[in-house]
């Protein structure tokens, strides 16, 4: 697929990943990808892994990230996070939230 060099949240189509979790894939090439997530209170993402490193920022709301070793981290607006490649992690949405995340390299499964 082609690179997507420019993108906008305005008018972009949301992809429902699971109930309460929607994604907009923004700009990307093979090396990196930027996505925006809309999360509804009460939604969850089970502990999982993926090859790309994941770096993010909580734009709005509160979430709890869970790690495979049993740790949990409460994050809110303005907090950032990083999960290295293949690090087990999951998510609980404590109130409606929005996240912006970068993946390196790009996630093939999120390409448009």
Image (cartoon, rainbow, N blue to C red):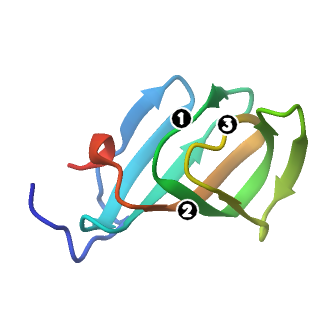
Residue 12 in percent (x, y) is at 30, 56
Residue 86 in percent (x, y) is at 57, 43
**At numbered mark 3, what does the secondary structure look like: helix, strand or loop?**
loop
Compare marks 1 and 2 and give the one earlier in the sequence. 1
Mark 1 and mark 2: Cα distance apart in space: 13 Å
Along the viewing direction, whichever of 11 and 90 lies nearer the viewer: 90
Q: Are circles 1 and 2 on residues that touch, CB within 8 Å? A: no
**Discs 3/2, front:** 3
Along the viewing direction, whichever of 5 and 50 lies nearer the viewer: 50
Residue 89 vs 12, above or below: the answer is above
**At numbered mark 2, what does the secondary structure look like: helix, strand or loop?**
strand
| Quarter residue 2 falls in | bottom left
Mark 3 and mark 2: Cα distance apart in space: 19 Å
Mark 1 and mark 3: Cα distance apart in space: 19 Å
| Quarter residue 99 falls in | bottom right
Query: Going 56% across and 36% down the picture, which residue do you hit?
Result: 49
| Quarter residue 110 falls in | top left
Compare marks 1 and 3 and give the one earlier in the sequence. 1
Residue 107 vs 44, above or below: the answer is below
In the picture, the disc for residue 88 is: 3
Query: Going 43% across and 58% down the picture, which residue do you hit?
Result: 35
- Give the residue number, with chain letter if any, for mark 2: 100
In the picture, the disc for residue 21 is: 1
Query: Going 21% across and 76% down the picture, which residue do you hit?
Result: 5
Task: Please identify the residue farthest to the left as the structure is shown.
Answer: 2
Q: Residues within 10 Å of mark 2 (few under 14, many from 20)?
A: some
Compare marks 3 and 2 and give the one earlier in the sequence. 3
């Amino acid at each position: 697929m082609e690179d997507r060099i420019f993108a906008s949240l305005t008018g972009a189509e949301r992809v429902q990943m699971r109930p309460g979790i929607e994604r907009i894939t923004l700009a990307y090439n093979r090396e990196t990808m930027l996505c925006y997530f809309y999360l509804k209170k009460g939604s969850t993402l089970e502990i999982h892994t993926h090859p790309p490193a994941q770096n993010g920022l909580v734009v709005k709301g509160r979430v709890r990230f869970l790690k495979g070793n049993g740790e949990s981290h409460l994050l809110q607006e303005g907090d950032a996070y990083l999960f290295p490649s293949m690090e087990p992690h999951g998510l609980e949405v404590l109130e409606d939230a929005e996240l912006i995340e970068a993946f390196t390299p790009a996630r093939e499964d999120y390409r448009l």
